[in-house]
Image (spheres, rainbow, N blue to C red):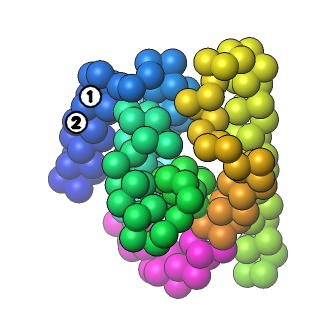
């Protein structure tokens, strides 16, 4: 394992341990951290056969940290979110918006990397379109998961939903994911260079 990847693994494990030590709500912690617990084995199993770019590994770990911090405090209670609320004069803790922005930002680049390397899409405009479609599909699926949690857990799902009284929370979350995906695609040239470097390292 390369030093960068080993460092990322150690950071991930350390933050996961901190997050799970004494979270505000254990059920919410499991729900928020579950994507990380699913993604890590997938990345480990595909590490040799289909390694990703360093750029993408770094972004995935950053996304995982956002999820794990949200799991530790619940999204509506993350201290950094309260700081943002104060600085920007907002009516609610906006940390969940950061989470949904990352939910669009990172999957857009994951989708782009898989589609390009697999030769599934060649046209740049169509590639961007498909990446955004995938982002919106993931966002919609996640909102359905939140709905299912609300139905199954009732009041116990309030911490997981984190709507903070916003009746348009679902639509706002999906909009932030779309913005995140669009912003990620602005890094296409940087991503292309990372892909070229990965191809050279595998020769």
Q: Which residue is depicted at the point 66% across and 19% down?
A: 155
Q: Secondary structure at mark 1?
A: helix
Query: Visible in this render: residue 14?
Result: yes
Q: Which residue is mark 2?
A: 14
Residue 188 falls within the magenta-colored stretch: yes
Q: Which residue is depicted at the point 25% across and 31% down?
A: 18
Q: Which quadrant of the rendered structure holds the N terminus?
A: top left
Q: Is residue 169 left or right of residue 64?
A: right
Percent position of residue 196, x then y: 46, 75
Q: Give the distance between the C-alpha atoms of the residues marked 1 and 2, in whole angstroms.
A: 5 Å
Percent position of residue 88, x then y: 46, 72
Percent position of residue 187, x then y: 53, 79
Residue 105 falls within the magenta-colored stretch: no
Specify start and end residues of the magenta stretch as a single range: 182-203
The local crowd at label 2, few if under 14, some if 14 to 19, many if 20 or more residues have their Cα within 10 Å, is few
Q: Which quadrant of the rendered structure holds the C terminus?
A: bottom left
The local crowd at label 1, few if under 14, some if 14 to 19, many if 20 or more residues have their Cα within 10 Å, is few
Q: Which residue is depicted at the point 50% across and 43% down?
A: 76
Majority secondary structure in the magenta region: helix
Q: Which residue is depicted at the point 71% across and 17% down?
A: 154
Percent position of residue 100, x then y: 60, 54
Quarter of image, res 83: bottom left
Q: Which residue is mark 1?
A: 17
């Amino acid at each position: 394992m390369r030093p960068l990847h080993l460092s990322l693994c150690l950071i991930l494990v350390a933050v996961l341990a901190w997050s799970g030590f004494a979270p505000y709500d254990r059920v919410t912690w499991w729900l928020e951290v579950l994507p990380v617990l699913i993604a890590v084995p997938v990345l480990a199993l595909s590490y040799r056969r289909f390694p990703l770019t360093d750029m993408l590994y770094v972004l995935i770990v950053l996304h995982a940290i956002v999820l794990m911090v949200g799991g530790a405090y619940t999204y509506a209670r993350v201290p950094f979110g309260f700081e943002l609320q104060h600085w920007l004069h907002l009516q609610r803790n906006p940390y969940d918006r950061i989470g949904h922005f990352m939910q669009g930002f990172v999957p857009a680049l994951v989708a782009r990397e898989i589609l390009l390397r697999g030769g599934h899409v060649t046209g740049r405009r169509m590639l961007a379109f498909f990446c955004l479609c995938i982002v919106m599909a993931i966002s919609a699926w996640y909102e359905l998961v939140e709905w299912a949690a609300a139905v199954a857990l009732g009041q116990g799902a309030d911490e997981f939903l984190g709507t903070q009284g916003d009746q348009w929370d679902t639509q706002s979350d999906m909009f932030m994911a779309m913005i995140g995906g669009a912003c990620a695609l602005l890094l296409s040239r940087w991503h292309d260079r990372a892909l070229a470097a990965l191809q050279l390292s595998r020769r």
